[in-house]
Amino acid sequence: MSPTPRHHRIEQLLGARLGPDLPADVIRRFVEDGIREDADLDFKRTLYPQDGDGRDELAKDVAAMANTRGGVILLGIEERDEVAVAAPGVTLGSDEEQRIRAIIKSRIRPLLPGFEILQVSGDDLLQGFFLLVVGVSELKPHLVVAGSSSKPLLLYPRRFGAQSLWLGEAELADAYRNRSDAARNQQDRLEAVHSEGLDKLWTEDTAWLVATLVPDVAGSMRLTNAALEAVDKWGHDLSPELFTSTRFGSVIINNRAVGLRRILLSVNHMTAASLARGNYAQLHLDGAGFAAVELVNLRQDEQEAQIALGWLVAELLAMLAVLTRHAVDNAGVSGDGILQVELIEPDRRLSKGRRMRLGEERYPPSTTLTYISGAVDLDRLPPARHTIPIDAVASNPIELVAAARLLLADLTSGFGLAEPPQLTVDGQIDLQAFGTLQGAARAWSERHGLPTI
């Protein structure tokens, strides 16, 4: 099952998180509380009919939500004047779920990036509620292929209040223009989050590994004292899940400060006006994030510096976990996002063109690294940038490893290495390649059920 798209307003009405463990009682309370339909909430008394009109109606309702702000279609709730009045439920089963998925896949274009079906039952496992959970889509507008195969109709629905209506020509033109603008705006947002994070780093004599994440569709969180306390608890709960023995892994349980529409995390006490030394993160309220870990300090007499590749891999795994979990857990993000990873060189006025090598730490540990790459000027290395499934990476360690390997392969290729040996192409963890971090790599892999070699 794919991660369920998040909808904070709906989850507040339910008093529970959308997911496979949702209890039926919280849905029945919609009737007691007189909950109204809205642009993101639609009630249906019965299942969709199996004739052509029923298939068209299902595709229309789902596409309409995707074309607006996403939401939940709840099958098994009766409404009167858009208010929930009864909860008789519907017959559940895998056959009906497969039928719904087939209709959505065949009749909506482009394919929905975020769509999940939840079956919620009570004491009677065959009777309950279907929740069609539609994520906010960065690919909107989505069209519906309605009518017959000989005379298909291409229509574009949208939610207007509690109703699903068709878009007119001018509205459709605006929707396509907004899709193009959204792609450009995301690139601009990525550059802004990246540059604002870099401005807070001490780079006079220090090289950094930095990661920047921007969701395709922004989430939201409030900057309140209660929210800050929740972030503190979130950090302490998340910390044991991270790759231990990393510098960045400690950032989420140390010092916290408040910045403009963001939360600042660092290993050392700092204010919004300070420059970071050590490890640092900016967690934005819209789910974007910036993370940085100090790689190496260059002394004036050094011509080259060395970076242990195993340690670089471990740090990036911790950074990606924190960024994606913040987006999903704190800001309610679902869907894809752009992730950029980059090695930042020290101030060139002081570093005088000194270069970096990748090395590996042997086990048992020795006092020096064994070089596995040539020396490279960091300013000649382009950043690694890829689209990742944020909620999948946040919830599935296999997806986390895959994302890290994809980005690391881009970085290591700049040093003449085809791939990072610590993470294999089939998702296994090569423990020996982690060198002195071998024990930490084994513990982390076992904790998350990852295969090792």
Image (cartoon, helix red, strand yellow):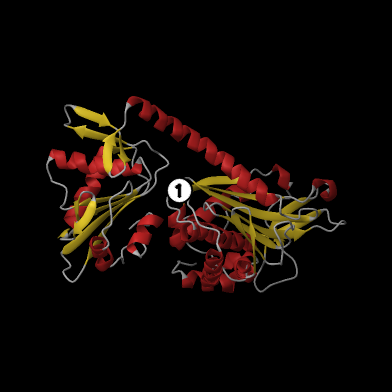
35 with respect to 187 (left or right)? left
Coordinates of residue 262 in the picture (x, y in percent): 60, 55
Q: From the viewer's side, name the closer residue of 423 and 183.
A: 183
> In this orientation, does residue 227 appear?
yes
Which type of secondary structure does the marked residue at label 1 adopt?
strand
Q: From the viewer's side, name the closer residue of 27 and 417.
A: 27
On-image quarter of the N terminus: bottom left
Coordinates of residue 291 in the picture (x, y in percent): 62, 56
Coordinates of residue 66 in the picture (x, y in percent): 34, 43
> In this orientation, does residue 91 appear?
no
Q: Is residue 162 above or below residue 290?
A: above
Residue shown at 23% from the left, 46% from the top:
102
120 with respect to 6 (left or right)? left
Instruction: Answer with the quarter of the image where residue 360 lies.
Output: bottom right
Q: Is residue 335 above or below residue 431?
A: above
The total number of labels drawn is: 1
* Residue that lies at the very extreme toward the right in this rendered image: 301
355 with respect to 39 (left or right)? right
Coordinates of residue 258 in the picture (x, y in percent): 63, 60
For the residue carrying disc 1, how many other residues have a C-alpha within 10 Å: few (<14), some (14-19), or many (20+)?
Answer: many
Residue shown at 21% from the left, 59% from the top:
129
Residue shown at 55% from the left, 59% from the top:
223
268 with respect to 242 (left or right)? right
Instruction: Answer with the quarter of the image where residue 127 lies.
Output: bottom left
| Kind of residue at disc 1 | Asp
Q: From the viewer's side, name the closer residue of 266 and 10.
A: 10
Q: Which residue is mark 1?
A: 336
Residue shown at 25% from the left, 68% from the top:
25
